[in-house]
């Protein structure tokens, strides 16, 4: 049940605020409170929370409203602050995470998205790395195009040597990102884009096939109309050396496209972005060319641009005319106008990490207003997500937001002036209004924000109808979608037992007790075919200035041709990019469905494997390793057939840590004698995280099982004569290693072009 906390007296109807009007009640779920306490609310030097959610919303509201004084010293800042507070505390609109975290505090860095230039020189490359560190330290994410860098093995005239190529420098950026902790709340995310015409494109396409590589980067291939035409015609196209501008060789477009498809099918990356389309909608072509996006791909930006994002909760935009639910377009338009005002103010009170970013951002004043709760809106309207009517709703809603946002921007321009680069822009046309903002709409991922707002994420389908959440003291709490619970009670099939059964299945289609019409309405991400994912994305894109962040989910059984068809459909439907994820495609993902078992010949039963007997004499060695629970002594023994057993002993006897380590060691020993590969055991142990990590001999030790994995890994490397390199697990590597949230252990979901935990709010992209 949602927790109710009382705020100041302001109205909830979107009208003019008064200081003594109806009292606002902030309704937050247990998950929302957890997320706010972990990531958003102010803390003292001991890490203790010293701010309530109401105080956070007031902090943000008053800080953003203070921008009014820049234009009118006599402005009624407090009245506007009440309006901003009302829509945030009512969870109808929320700005991007850095604004909620930092507004009104010392850091005051409020932007989520940045793009930095990377030119073909050591000076530019390492200046970009320095700028990246400053941005990540302030809480932002960065995008880069590496297309200007000369290809691998190209000439370096100044030294007479050869170039190492874009991918080698991406590894340097990745390492720099790993070294910077973002203000204690966010870790840096990057987008790397390489044009399909670059000579190193195939190396780029495959550079993340190893799960451990470039974990702080999302990858996208920059694709042109010319390339796609060559793919369709099955012809060759030129690979151009950016240093000389000359075609270096010809390549088969279909072969390169197939390589992109193969890698995306195998690992979820790269995505693709249609740079021609982004530049066709570039509002300021006279200023520069768009060559990259932010980490999730929804915000195309010029070099040194940043953008401030916010999302309207569509779940609250439902009214009734007495004949049933309908979209409250009047409220939606009012809220859109206020949100545009809010985001424009953010630009003025923002504290930018670099002067070049401040200059470019204020010259174009791009904002990105988007939505969350689309799936909830459809459910309230009785519209299945995967239906033609859902596409109509998407178009109607986004068209209303786009038109209202431009009207609000034009109104601000009459009072404050148009954006500085308006002359010569695509908006500078006879008879057209002057605009305050070069762009006004973006569909961004809202994984964490939607948990706070208590709604579905972005424009994604529901991730689950029911699920089990682990809470304190190993309690397991059943979470049920409130709309589904209401429908179940209304249709007379609700029971606690049935809800638990629903939670055990990925889809309502697997639960026969749920009526067919309810199954069709409450579809989840994996019920929706990839084609419908793309069509919904395209429906929103048609009325969005910037781009749309969305993940096209595939079942594990999807083929490479399925992925190919989605990429082609995204191209034909007018999308500006597309990201896919096939369930279980990460090599080290543990939480997967449909594991195949060896079968007994002539039988449907799985084969039974018995471990070989333990000999009376074994030989090995013991290593001490430091863990968060104390020193752990790990003994690794061999018999004549190889590794056969592992023993553990804690430095201090007794306790759960000692018992769990002993049980882990026994299971490893049984597995080894049953023929399980030691390398496979290491892969499954490494990356398991507990609440108390430690540091030992240059390696991060995440838990006692991780420590055993480290010792086994060292043992195997010594046997092979390999060097013993310390292993440093990043915060973001662990989601791909263990398939679980690195903060709470919950399930990681791929949505909105990002990785999100719906249990605690962890988000790889913020």
Image (cartoon, grey):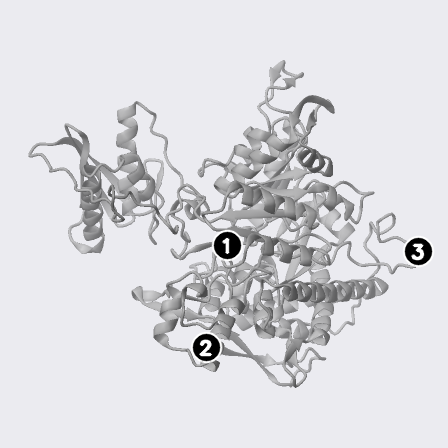
Secondary element at tag 2: helix
Q: How far apart are marks 3 and 2 (CA)?
A: 56 Å
Q: What element carries label 3?
A: loop
Label number found at residue 763: 1
Closer to the camera in the image, 634 or 713 = 713
Q: Residue at x 66, y 41 (%)?
A: 116
Is the C-beta separation of discs 3 and 2 under 8 Å?
Answer: no
Instruction: Depth check: give the residue in front, 236 or 587.
Output: 236
Question: At numbered mark 1, what does the secondary structure look like: helix, strand or loop?
Answer: loop
> Farthest residue in the right direction?
430
Which mark's residue is nearer the viewer, 1 or 3? Answer: 3
Above or below, 576 against 70 in this view is above
Pick the residue in front: 138 or 195: 195
* Residue 733 to residue 389: above or below: above
Mark 1 or mark 2, which is nearer to you?
2
Binning the other alpha carbons within 10 Å of mark 2 as few (below 14), some (14 to 19) or many (20 upward) gives some
Quadrant of the rendering where the N terminus is positioned = bottom left
Q: In this view, does 219 lie above or below 483?
A: above
x then y, percent, for residue 510: 41, 63
Q: Which of marks 3 and 2 is in front?
A: 2
Q: Residue 698 carries which label?
A: none
Q: In this view, does 445 lie to the left or right of 541?
A: left
Observer able to see residue 279:
yes
Q: How far apart are marks 1 and 3 (CA)?
A: 44 Å
Residue that mark 2 sits on? 488
Q: Which residue in the protein does label 3 denote?
A: 430
């Amino acid at each position: 049940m949602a927790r109710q906390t009382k705020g100041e007296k302001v109205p909830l109807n979107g009208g003019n605020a008064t200081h003594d009007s109806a009292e606002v009640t902030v309704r937050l779920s247990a998950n929302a409170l957890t997320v706010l306490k972990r990531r958003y609310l102010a803390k003292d030097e001991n890490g203790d929370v010293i701010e309530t959610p109401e105080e956070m919303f007031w902090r943000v509201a008053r800080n953003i409203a203070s921008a009014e004084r820049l234009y009118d010293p006599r402005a009624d800042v407090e009245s506007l602050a009440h309006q901003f507070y009302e829509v945030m505390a009512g969870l109808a609109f929320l700005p991007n995470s850095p604004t909620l975290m930092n507004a009104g505090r010392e850091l005051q860095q409020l932007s989520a998205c940045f793009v930095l230039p990377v030119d073909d020189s050591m000076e530019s490359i390492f200046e970009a790395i320095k700028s990246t560190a400053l941005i990540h330290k302030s809480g932002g994410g960065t995008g880069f195009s590496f297309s200007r860098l000369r290809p691998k093995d190209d000439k370096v005239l100044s030294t007479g040597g050869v170039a190492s190529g874009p991918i080698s420098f991406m590894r340097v950026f990745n390492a720099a990102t790993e070294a910077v902790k973002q203000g204690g709340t966010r870790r840096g995310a990057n987008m790397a884009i390489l044009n399909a015409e670059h000579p190193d494109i195939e190396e780029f396409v495959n550079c993340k096939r190893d799960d451990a590589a470039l974990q702080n980067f999302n990858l996208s291939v920059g694709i042109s109309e010319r390339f796609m035409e060559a793919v369709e015609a099955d012809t060759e196209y030129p690979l151009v050396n950016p240093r000389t501008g000359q075609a270096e060789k010809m390549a088969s477009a279909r072969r390169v496209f197939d390589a992109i498809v193969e890698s995306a099918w195998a690992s979820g990356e790269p995505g693709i972005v249609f740079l021609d389309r982004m530049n066709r909608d570039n509002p300021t072509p006279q200023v520069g060319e768009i060559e990259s996006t932010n980490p999730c791909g929804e915000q195309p930006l010029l070099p040194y641009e940043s953008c401030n994002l916010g999302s309207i909760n569509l779940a609250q935009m439902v009214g009734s005319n007495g004949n049933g639910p309908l979209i409250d377009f009047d409220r939606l338009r009012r809220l859109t106008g206020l949100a545009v005002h809010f985001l424009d103010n953010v630009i003025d009170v923002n504290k930018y990490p670099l002067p070049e970013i401040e200059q470019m951002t204020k010259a174009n004043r791009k904002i990105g207003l988007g939505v969350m709760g689309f799936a909830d809106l459809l459910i309230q309207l009785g519209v299945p997500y995967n239906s033609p009517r859902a596409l109509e709703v998407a178009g109607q809603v986004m068209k209303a937001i786009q038109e209202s946002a431009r009207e609000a921007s034009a109104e601000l321009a009459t009072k404050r002036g148009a954006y500085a680069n308006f002359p010569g822009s695509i908006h500078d046309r006879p008879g057209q209004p002057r605009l305050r903002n070069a762009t006004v709409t973006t569909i961004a991922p809202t994984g964490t924000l939607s948990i706070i707002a208590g709604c579905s994420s972005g424009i994604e389908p529901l991730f689950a109808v029911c699920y089990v959440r682990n809470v304190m003291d190993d309690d397991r709490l059943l979470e049920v979608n409130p709309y589904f619970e209401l429908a179940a009670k209304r249709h007379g099939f609700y029971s606690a037992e049935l809800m638990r059964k629903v939670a055990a299945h990925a889809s309502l289609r697997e639960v026969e007790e749920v009526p067919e019409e309810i199954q069709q309405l409450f579809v989840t991400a994996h019920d929706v075919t990839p084609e419908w994912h793309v069509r919904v994305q395209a429906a929103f894109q048609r009325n969005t200035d910037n781009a749309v962040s969305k993940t096209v989910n595939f079942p594990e059984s999807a083929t490479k041709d399925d992925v190919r068809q989605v990429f082609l459909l995204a191209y034909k439907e007018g999308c500006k990019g597309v990201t896919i994820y096939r369930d279980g495609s990460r090599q080290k993902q543990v939480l997967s469905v449909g594991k195949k078992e060896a079968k007994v010949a002539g039988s449907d039963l799985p084969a039974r494997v018995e471990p070989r007997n333990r000999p009376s004499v074994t030989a090995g060695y013991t290593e001490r390793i430091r863990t968060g629970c104390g020193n752990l002594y790990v003994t690794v023994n061999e018999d004549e057939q190889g590794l056969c057993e592992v023993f553990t002993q804690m430095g201090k006897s007794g306790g759960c840590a000692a018992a769990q380590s002993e049980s882990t060691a026994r299971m490893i020993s049984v597995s080894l004698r049953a023929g399980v590969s030691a390398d496979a055991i290491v892969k499954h142990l490494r990356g398991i995280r507990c609440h108390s990590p430690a540091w030992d001999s240059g390696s991060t030790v995440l838990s006692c099982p991780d420590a055993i994995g480290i010792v086994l890994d060292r043992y195997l490397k010594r046997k092979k004569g390999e060097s013993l390199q310390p292993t440093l697990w990043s915060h973001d590597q662990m989601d791909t290693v263990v398939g679980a949230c690195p903060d709470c252990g919950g399930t990681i979901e791929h949505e909105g072009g990002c990785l999100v935990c719906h249990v605690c709010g962890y988000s790889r992209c913020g």
